[in-house]
Image: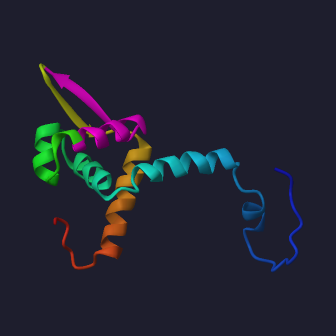
Amino acid sequence: MEKMDLPQDPGRSGKETWQNPPGGENFQTLAEIFKQLGDGSRLRIFWVLCHCEACVVDLSATVAMSSPAVSHHLKLLRSAGLIVNRREGKEVYYTAADTEQARLLHEMIEELMKIACPSGEKHG
């Protein structure tokens, strides 16, 4: 992206950074990740899986949703690379992916929870 001359030059520090933002495809990738977490149920499932490994039946009980609904959300989270699974016999267990992306998203969720829900209530 070529450097652009802006109509107003407020002389702010960091001008080079905001005048030369990353390409649109980078922001589209981020938008897809946030889209996966834009559903409250999916966000809650991801949060649970950041704290433990669970099968669909246990997740269903934990988040009070049907198994098919949980499975749908798990499929989307898995396709986004935010969770992984392992099979043990007939059972499949899910957990948050051991990636920097998943860790950072979990930290962000925890911090936003403190800000948005200051009462300290984490469950409900």
Residue that appears at 35% across and 60% down: 109
Between residue 106 and residue 72, name the one nearer to us: 72
Magenta stretch bounds:
69-88
Residue 66: % across, % down: 16, 45
The reply to whether residue 98 is in sight is no
Snapshot quadrant of residue 14? bottom right
Q: Quadrant of residue 12?
A: bottom right
* Residue 78 in the figure: left or right of residue 64: right
Residue 111 located within the stretch drawn in magenta = no
Residue 112 drawn above or below residue 25: below
Residue 108 appears in the figure: yes
Foreground pick, 73 / 3: 73
Q: Residue at x 18, y 45 (%)?
A: 52
Residue with the most extreme top position: 89
Image location of residue 9, percent across then percent down:
85, 77
* In front of the other: 75 or 51: 75
Identity of the residue drawn at 68% across and 49% down? 24
Q: Is residue 119 above or below residue 47?
A: below
Q: Position of residue 34 (x, y in %)?
A: 46, 53
Q: On the picture, is 121 further left or further right than 73? A: left
Where is residue 19? Give x, y as percent.
78, 62
- In which quarter of the view is residue 70 placed? top left
Left-right relation of 35 to 91: right
Placement of the C terminus among the 4 image quadrants:
bottom left
**In the displayed structure, does residue 61 sit left or right of residue 97?**
left
